[in-house]
Amino acid sequence: MNDAKLSEILYSIGHEVFAEYYRDLSDQSFSRAALIERLLTDSRNAGRGRNGGGYTIGTCRSKVSHGRRIIRAGRGVDALRLIADSTNERARERALAQLRAMGE
């Protein structure tokens, strides 16, 4: 996966979501279905998504699939570094915390 594709996929997931769920996306013992359910529930509780009602199931499926695609391609740390350089403060803080936890 080249840098342009990484940026494109990362944009579709959302920087904050990728940084927040990086560990879960990386953990293959965490099932796809469980991760989708968690993202769906968390988005409803946080008032994210369309009209503050949470993400749709399709949106959650897409975010999980794209996030895991980045991980499988071995570009997870690169994605976190891109997010750490972004202007989104919450996403940047989460990415930096993930990088610190990994010793990066």
Image: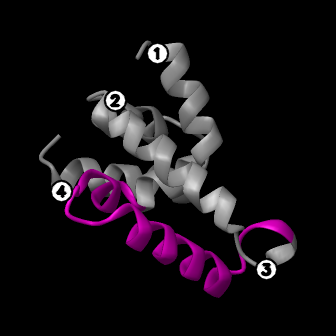
Disc 4 residue type (three-letter): Ala
What number is the disc on residue 100?
A: none
* 62, above or below 75, in the image: below
Task: Tell which tag, 2 or 3, sits nearer the viewer.
Answer: 3
Q: Which residue is mark 4?
A: 101
Assign the N terminus to one quadrant of the image. Answer: top left
Marks 1 and 4 sit apart, C-alpha to C-alpha, by 24 Å
Closer to the camera: disc 3 or disc 4? 3
Residue found at x 58% / y 46%: 13
Which of disc 1 and disc 2 is earlier in sequence? 1
SS class, disc 2: helix
- Dot 1, crowdedness within 10 Å: few (<14), some or many (≥20)? few
Q: Earlier in the sequence, mark 3 or mark 4?
A: 3
Q: CA distance from mark 3 to mark 1?
A: 33 Å
Residue located beneath label 3 in the image:
53
Q: Main secondary structure of the magenta part?
A: helix
Q: Which residues are magenta?
A: 21-50
Q: Identify the element where label 1 is drawn.
A: helix
- Mark 3 lies on a secondary structure that is loop
* CB under 8 Å between discs 2 and 1: yes
The image shows residue 9 at horizontal and vertical percentages of 56, 32
Magenta residue check for 39 = yes
Where 56 sits versus 42, above or below?
above
What residue do we see at 23% from left, 57% from top?
Answer: 27
| Structural crowding at the residue carrying mark 4, measured as other residues with C-alpha within 10 Å and reported as few (<14), some (14–19) or many (≥20) | few
Residue to which mark 2 is pinned:
78
Q: Identify residue type, mark 1.
A: Asp
